[in-house]
Amino acid sequence: MGIAFVVTYLATHLVRRAAVKYEIYPKAIRDRDSHSNPTPRIGGIAMFLGFLVSLAIAAPIGWFDVVFADPGPIIAISVAALIIMVIGFLDDLYDLDWTLKLAGQFLAAGVLAWNGVQIVSLPIFGITVGSFGVSFVVTVFLAVLIMNAVNFIDGLDGLVAGVVLIGTTVFFVYSYLLAQQISPTNYFNLATMLSAIVIGMCAGFLPHNWHVAKIFMGDSGALLLGLLMTTSALTVTGQIDPASLNRDDLVPAVLPLILPISILILPLLDFALAVVRRLAAGKSPFAADRKHLHHRLQDFGHSHMGSVLVFYFWSISVSVSCLLLFLTEIVW
């Protein structure tokens, strides 16, 4: 967490300086933009560096032996993160066609799922979904959905970094407590480590992105955070043996997926409405506009930061409620 914070904070400063020096930023201000001055939007590069350096430093530490014992998932996550960062970076610079951008997202999600980073088990009305084919499809769909939901709310200073920071912090506590229940002697699992890294990435980037932002994370950062949020949730599902579950155990079993989806329910709804709205107008489902929820909050009279704080309040309320539900299960 600390390494990710320091590296991301310093790297963001360097990336911004390089972007300003070499004018790697859009010169035109779009109607939907919330800023009035040209601003670099390649902060995702710095966040990706924070992610990679954190993994490299954690690898030789004995606490994480259980995480790196099988390097397959770590390699798959790193490759998927690289793919999504590059696709986002190219889109930030050249405004890629939406089909190419979506194909890159499916490729990154497919790399995860094909290499075993997928939904291992999910009790739904007493039915366990566990076949490789079904898990692969559901995993890819869920990853692409959450990546786009996160990306769609990246329209105000500090919005995505703050919302993901809040949600991932609560998820870190949840995965840590769950790991303690499963293995009291070694609870440094992949979900806990990834959550800690994402927390550090967001905390390191947020000071640069706070209103008035000096740099934006861009698609490279928002899609990366969405991918890592999904990955953290997916790895937790593999820690729970569905055969050992009874009705009283359903909360810890489904919470890994309920938590991120609950936190992102407003962005997910916004995403769905945006896709329907644009398709009905004969436009690309990924065509940008100024009709997102955070824009509407401003139209209703909320200030820039007031709109951001509404999302923060929602994230805190939902994520803490889910965590308390899990803690109640532990107590009882």
Image (cartoon, rainbow, N blue to C red):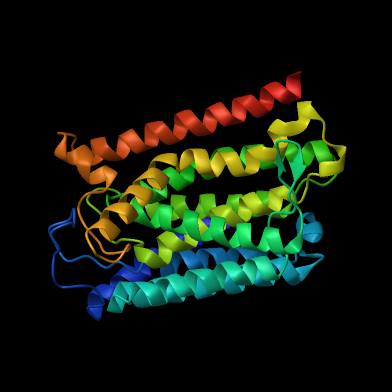
Q: Nearer the viewer, residue 103 or 108?
A: 103
Seen in the picture, residue 311 relative to 48 is either above or below; the reply is: above
Left or right of residue 207, residue 202 in this image: right
Q: Is residue 10 above or below residue 193?
A: below
Residue farthest along the top direction in this orientation:
332
Please identify the residue farthest to the bottom as the structure is shown.
22
Instruction: Count up the numbered dots.
Output: 0
Q: Position of residue 212 (x, y in %)?
A: 22, 51
Residue 173 percent coordinates (x, y) = 63, 38
Q: In which image quadrant can residue 264 be found?
A: top left
Residue 139 to residue 82: above or below:
above
Q: Which residue does the image show at 49% across and 69% down from the upper left?
A: 105
Identify the residue at horizontal 81%, vertical 58% (top origin).
Answer: 66
Q: Quarter of the image containing the C terminus?
A: top right
Percent position of residue 64, x then y: 76, 57
The image position of residue 306, as x and y in percent, is: 24, 35
Going by the image, does 1 lie left or right of 254? Answer: left
User: Which quarter of the figure has residue 148?
Assistant: bottom left
User: Does the image show residue 239?
Assistant: yes
Image quadrant assignment for residue 163: top left
Q: Using the image, determine if residue 129 lies above or below residue 76.
A: above
Q: Which residue is drawn at 66% across and 53% down?
A: 234
* Residue drawn where x is 25% and y is 81% of the image: 22
Residue 11 in view (yes/no): no
